[in-house]
Amino acid sequence: MVDIIIVGGGPAGMTAALYALRNGKSALVIEKNGFGGQITHSPKVENYPGTLQMSGNEFADRMLEQILAQGAEIELEKVISVEDAGDFKRVRTEEGGCYEGRAVVIATGVKHRMLGLEGENELVGEGISFCAVCDGDFYTGQTVCVAGGGNSALQEAILLADKCSRVVILQDLPQLTGEGKLQDVLAARENVQVICDTKINRLLTADGALKGVEIESRTTGEKQEIACDGLFVAIGLIPENGPFADLAALNDWGYFDSDEKCLTKTPGVYVAGDCRSKGVRQLTTAVADGATAALAACRYINEQ
């Protein structure tokens, strides 16, 4: 049995492991895909305090090296359930693994809803992005498209309009669905174009790089190509918290209904990172959650 089991190996999960280990606790991190989470999709990270520039993969590699040096255990498996056994928690995986810990930190993150286009995954970080705060500077003076028409898409477009020569919003519904005030801000920008009731048919590439998109009007069926240097996909995030709903309450959107204390309704179970209900999802807020959740778990163990 270990002291703290962390479900998820993104920035929040690995920070939780680091803080647990630094507080004299043993830690096991179980990750289903690859360590680092969504940040590995960012070719450059320039908004992390104390670091001028690094890639998301470099950040993930450094964190993994750091926690391994501190004594973390890791397993590459998919967690399917966490059971409350009173004094300890039992974590089961799809591969048949069963692990026991005195406390659990769930840091499963989110995944971006994708467009489902051929070659899309290969272009993530190479023309396709999800975060204007993280990647907008790379497209300064260039043309970008934004897929989506809700609040998130409009907020991304506003940030991009300050940097890019042209921003084209592509909305599959007949109208934008974001707040009126955001629409008003964009309407005042001469470098922003809005195309509604359209779908993106395919991605246009050359030499492995994104060069544009082909769109089709849902009304007329007319197709056209739009040249662009980048495509920001803002059609929603998908949390994967369902397997843990009996231990930690979910809000209407499927995120853990927990505040900055990272507590749940189950003593000894904590949540951290983008999977938690929050207003800002950034690298810095993820690592902050990881520290908070781990310290809470340490206090819980010490009090037993």
Image (tube, helix red, strand yellow):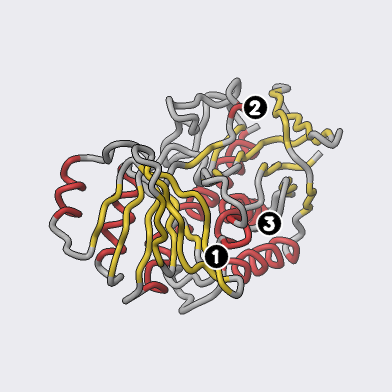
Where's residue 160, x and y in %?
31, 63
Q: Where is residue 179 in the image (x, y as percent from the top left)?
A: 22, 40
Name the residue tied to disc 2: 243
Q: Which of marks 1 and 3 is nearer the N terminus?
A: 3
Q: Which residue is drawn at 84% across and 37% down?
A: 95
Sequence-first disc among 2 and 3:
3
Q: Quadrant of residue 172?
A: top left
- Which residue is identified by label 3? 35
Q: What element carries label 1?
A: loop
Q: Image height check: is 223 above or below 297? A: below
Where does the image place residue 295, in percent across and percent down from the top left?
56, 47
Q: In whole angstroms, how far apart are the C-alphas of marks 1 and 2?
A: 30 Å
Residue, disc 1:
125
Local secondary structure at mark 2:
helix
Q: Quarter of the image holding residue 209?
A: bottom right
Percent coordinates x, y for residue 130 in the rendering: 46, 56
- Cα–Cα gap, marks 1 and 3: 17 Å
